[in-house]
Amino acid sequence: MFEWLEPLQLFRLDTALILTLLVISVHITFRVGIMSLAPMGFAAVGGYTAALVATKSELPFAIGLLAATVLAGLIGALFAPPVLRLRGIYMALGSLALAQAIVVLIRINDYTNGPNGIAGIPIEVRTEYLVVALLVAFVLLELSHRSHFGRAAKAVRLDERTAEGMGVNVFRVRFVSFTAAAAVAGCAGALEAHRTTVISPDQYGFATLVIVFTYVLVGGNGHWAGPVLVTWGLTILRDSLHFAGSNWEDVIYGVLLVVILLVAPNGLSDRSLYRGLRRRWRARRDQPAPDVHDPAEKVASR
Amino acid sequence: MQQTINGLALGSTYALLGVGVTLVWGVLNLLNFAHAQILTWGTFAALAALRLGIPVPVAILVGMVTAGVLSVLIDLVVLAPLRGRKAPEFSFVVATIGVSLVLTTVLRTYTDAQTEAFPRQGFPVGAFEFAGQNVPRLQVVMLVIAVVAMVGLAYWLNRTKSGRSVRAVAHDRETAELLGVNSQLVFSICFFVAGALAAVAGIFVAASAAQVSYSSGDGLLLIAFAVIILGGMGSVKGAIVGGLVLGVVEVYATTYVSSSFREIIAFAVILAMLVARPSGFFGKKEAARV
Amino acid sequence: MTAMLELSGVSKHFGGMKAVNDVSFSVEEGAIYGLIGPNGAGKTTVVNLISGYLKPTAGRITLSGSDLAGLRPHRLAAAGIARTYQNLKLFDESTVLENVLIGRHLSFKGRRWQLGRVRRREEVEQHEVARRLIDRVGLTSVIDVDVAELSYGMRRRVEIARAMATEPRLLLLDEPTAGMNRAESDDIGRLIQMINDEGVTVLLVDHNVRLVTEVCHQVVVLDWGSVLTKAGPHEVWQDERVKTAYLGVKERRTAETVEAPDAGR
């Protein structure tokens, strides 16, 4: 179906699609207010699980993918209780420590071939699979967004204690989100391993994390489409600008991230950014604003 | 006993790192993820100075000043505007991660990702006997410098006007400002000191290992965080104790358990402390957990 | 009359400070009780204790006889306790409807991933319930407006609608009329009575004397963390101790300033 694209373009497309999955993983945690730096750790779990299954056993790719996703999810579930109890900077540190610990364990281990990584992973991933996987993810995300769980997630992000007072089981909402995000990140890692055929511990560091965070922060917390569209838009932009080598891309991304944070510390989906615009828009169309100063109906006594 | 001394020597490096980080945290409530790169840049600056034939003590100063200035610049260009916009805490973390990425990439490109040799001449070499143990001179000097730095810091914070301003801002920024303290100046001073201390640690590590590369500092970042979590975030005393303890623990663990455990120690410490006692041994009990 | 809510010997100490000290009272089922007292008397602390935000240092709190000890706020909400907040805690970046829908969270029976007609029907039903609640507090015209753009009085009403959305048996209102004028507080008073008529027991914390007197069946007075007295809404103001608690401080202070000029010498 995608044969008309050149191999390099196809590779870039697949990479972008897999990156989208990672962005989705981070989005799932951000929308509940969990500011975790752990995603790359879970991607590493997924990537290495799939790679090991593929190179050290005869099991089919699907099994490896499943194992990767499940294992990443399990590790997420295992570490969720202690990590989720933390807030703010402590959560950032704890999640970072978890991710780095995973990467270091991989790096010092002989079974995982240490710092040399694993090569020769068979290519099993076709673009069609990725598209299907993403479509499924989108459907699930939208269903979740429109459900009471999605509303509860937003409430938890905005004001945990009040959400709890309204009956939301805050711990469960965060636990489910953290675990699901871990599983999705693991899946992305596995898919990447089977597409790039080579993995090593060093690729799970800050570089990709920064890129993914940029996309999610720019896209905002309002709706999953934000980060996804930003991912696609910026990826196309990046490719069409033909940067020489990855070095300066990293610098640009670092700078871009910082600039975005300065302009919109709460992300681009923060409604307050647009309030001024909305008022001007309404004025231009001569639309009266809803009357917010005098209650239209008083509380009728019956 | 030998191991304990080695541990203390290693720990004094960690302590120097931790003190700088805890100073910034205590005053600004910020963990600077770019700290490792600042350290590395300072070390490279010292290397450049050494290559120009500049004597060791001056070269160290060059490194310290470079790291200090870089640190202050990062604050002024990136962090101060964020503060002005009352950005949420997480944006600061991400912003410093972004800065760290930029610094890493620039340095990596500039050095072509090569590991450079770091000259040892001019640094204390060899070892001397003490109570039957082999005590490497370099580590002792590091320890001494660390102690001097800490004493100096303690004196500064407790007995000088500028030091008191720092403590005032750490305690309550608004009131301090109302009393006429220039909080931005205080922040800049803290960033400078933190950077300078980190550079010292980095230079001595490089001299001890006889080499340095763009990624030398990366492993030290989490160690610095582990130190301050152990000792209590915001406590200088805690950073010193935490650093020394961590150094000793690491040396013993790698000797008696496995050498590959080296890097794991820091993470294990962080995770364990966050679970058991997030405020550390000397820190104030903030709302770290729910 | 059965007691809906009962506090026995409840204390809350923060280090050396006794915010609430050996407080005991019960709220009859179906009644509107007022909880009053000067600022700092511990009223909001009591509300926080009842709604699970704080754990008592000592004592027991029961709802229809069941001990509420150690239950987290979301379990208490499920048990039928809802509250509003002194400092108004509406969800930002959300409309009136979205805020009230959070209150419906507990009544969603379907599982998260349930697809198809069952789910859609439940969503529609819950939206309807929310709309009705918003209608009852008179905010239908602003139902899709971001709460940040609403006036203070309207925001208070959104909070009440949201609390009512949880279908509580006991509603705790923490200073719902703070900063309101006469007409607005009368509106809230009518709303409270309407809620009570439907069978919801109400515990009202407020400084508005007129509101408390008109609406409450019984009034509990708190001062310095302890219960001063419990009486009917008219009798309670005749009590000397209550008068001193609210007004006596001013008299004491006046006496002090007369003496102060001599103190320095």
Image (cartoon, coloured by chain):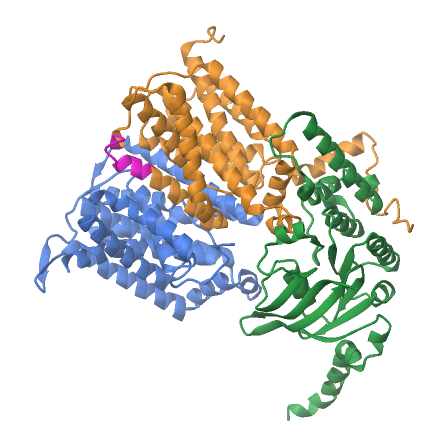
Query: In the image, is C229 to the left or to the right of C215?
Result: left
Residue at left 72%, top 55%?
A: C84
- The residue stretch that appears in magenta: A103-114
On-image quarter of the N terminus of chain C: bottom right
User: In this rendering, does residue C118 appear at all?
Assistant: yes
Foreground residue among B188 and A69: A69
Foreground residue among C192 and C88: C192
User: In this rendering, does residue A279 appear at all?
Assistant: no
Residue at left 46%, top 51%?
A: B30
Query: In the image, is A289 to the left or to the right of B160?
Result: right
Residue B265 position within the rendered picture, expressed as x and y whole percent measured from the top left = 29, 48
Tell how many labels. 0
Look at the picture and state if C256 lies above or below C120: below
Asked if the stretch drawn in magenta spans residue A111, the answer is yes
Chain B takes which shade in the image? blue
Look at the picture and state if A128 lies above or below C49: above
Look at the picture and state if A247 lies above or below B152: above
Chain letter, colour orange in render = A
Residue B58 position within the rendered picture, expressed as x and y whole percent measured from the top left = 24, 52
Foreground residue among C75 and B37: C75
Query: In the image, is B219 to the left or to the right of A17?
Result: left
Asked if the stretch drawn in magenta spans residue B132, the answer is no
Chain C takes which shade in the image? green
Examine the image and state in which quarter residue A7 appears: top left
Look at the picture and state if A57 lies above or below A167: above
Residue A163 position within the rendered picture, expressed as x and y whole percent measured from the top left = 63, 48
Foreground residue among B281 and A284: B281
Residue C54 position within the rendered picture, expressed as x and y whole percent measured from the top left = 60, 61
On-image quarter of the C terminus of chain C: bottom right
